Image (tube, grey):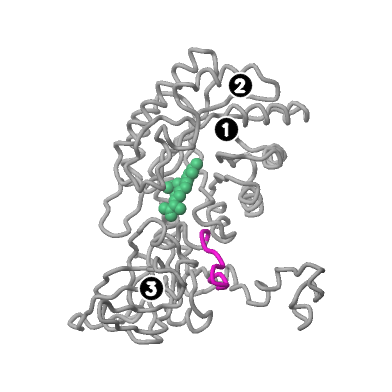
Amino acid sequence: MAWFEYRNGVLYAESVSLVRIAEEIGTPVYCYSNAALKANYKEFADAFGHRNILIAYSVKANANQAVITTFSDCGAGADVVSEGELQRALAAGIPGSRIVFSGVGKTQKELKAGLAAQVHQFNLESKAQLESLSEIAANQNVKARVAFRVNPDVDAKTHDKIATGRKADKFGVPIVEARGLYDLAGSLPGIEVVGVDLHIGSQLTDLEPFKDAFSRLAELVNALRRDGHDIRQIDLGGGLGVRYRDEEPPTALSYAGLVDKIFGGFGCQLIFEPGRALVANAGILLSQVIEIKHLSERRFVIIDAAMNDFLRPALYDAWHPIDPVCEAPVDAKREIVDIVGPVCESGDILGRGRAMSFLAPGDLVAIGAAGAYGAVMASNYNTRPLAAEVMVHGGEIAIVCPRLQLDELIGRDRLPQWLGKPTNPFDEHGAT
Ligand code: LLP
């Protein structure tokens, strides 16, 4: 946690103490480091030097406007998978010319929104998507720039739920069927074939699956060019892993070396869609201990963040570091505990079997590397308002998403007229 360090025994985000954040904002709260976001972006960009590339930040990893704007200011583009993400990227100042529109199922409304934004490239995932887009674009008398996301049938050797490039996965078009689809695309009105695309999975900690997939894609580019298609953009997706525990993911430089070796000679623009690698270690989830519960079998530390705030441990058995905000002395006694949230699910465990110094109610803990797929996957389960989000910049704190209040949350519901009560139960109390 380079941007999250202990200073005199207290964990800081840049120059702001997490104790101060908890006092001023309350918990649970996501805290992002602006410097970390910029450093991660720079590391990725620098690895490619002055090559012709587009870094299309994968908005799904962390969709906060302050995060997207930070990357936009660095010169990033965006990889979006819905109209909502498209609007977010545009609102953060990323022009359509730097946006790639991915996604396994795009509605007609979304295709129209992509056309209106004149996105750089649509990454199509089926013949049906191609035909819909062709019809819409031809009706508007415009041309959509397209690539197909191909499924190279490569096992990314990552968690089963985040591998996307095996032939049984729902994503992309089988690479063996791609040439036929490109020929069809080349013959349809409203379509301009510009590139190829793949994304084989997330949290890859080894270059080998990238190498296999990229080599297959390079062969396809050669074949497509022989078939007469003007392939000038190669989108290599995201997927570069990060260290949560003891993983040793490839560095951006070694990844760039591999990309260069395979695609250096094609004279194409290379597009990347990194998400996790840019944001994971730039965020923590700050939480407070509610209660310690000692049962005969186990010891539970119940904290005020739960699976609804941070789903990765429950959904993928993901391991995230959990550290006390106020450091215990090195010789402090430790006990093995399960760190759990208050949600009514046995799976609501943030960290299982952790050796922690003694924690007491009121103590603060930081769940590390929570900047990617954290806040974006949160829900209101158990009618828990979403955690607030803050960003620090040196010694400054900014609330980048306030905690939703309970009246706002409950007040979204409407009662049907036949119940004979006000349609919004909160109207009675004057709340909206
Ligand atoms: N491009 C496409 C088409 C994607 O589907 C994804 C992620 C990315 C780029 C960004 O991948 P990254 O660089 O972040 O690995 N919720 C899961 C991860 C799901 C990833 C979905 N697609 C998790 O928490 O591990």
Ligand 1 contact, mark 2 (Cβ < 8 Å): no
**Residue at 45% across / 31% down in the picture?**
151
**Given this view, does label 2 or label 3 mark the residue nearer the observer?**
3
Relative to the observer, which residue lies in front, 422 or 213? 422
Q: Is residue 380 magenta?
A: yes
| Magenta segment | 376-387
Q: Residues within 10 Å of mark 3 (few under 14, many from 20)?
A: many
- Residue type beneath disc 3: Val
State the SS at label 3.
strand
Give the spatial CA distance, label 1 vs label 3.
41 Å
The residue pinned by badge 3 equals: 340
In this figure, which residue is indicated by the disc labeled 1? Answer: 124
Above or below, comparing residue 110 to residue 267 in the picture: below
Sequence order check, earlier mark of 2 and 3: 2
Q: Residue at x 42, y 67 (%)?
A: 284
Identify the residue position indicated by label 2 in the image: 185
Question: Which quadrant would residue 262 be assigned to in this image?
Answer: top left
Q: Are marks 1 and 2 in contact (CB under 8 Å)?
A: yes
The kind of residue tagged 1 is: Leu
Q: Amino acid at mark 2?
A: Ala
Residue in the picture at 64% in, 16% down:
187
Q: Quadrant of the N terminus?
A: bottom left
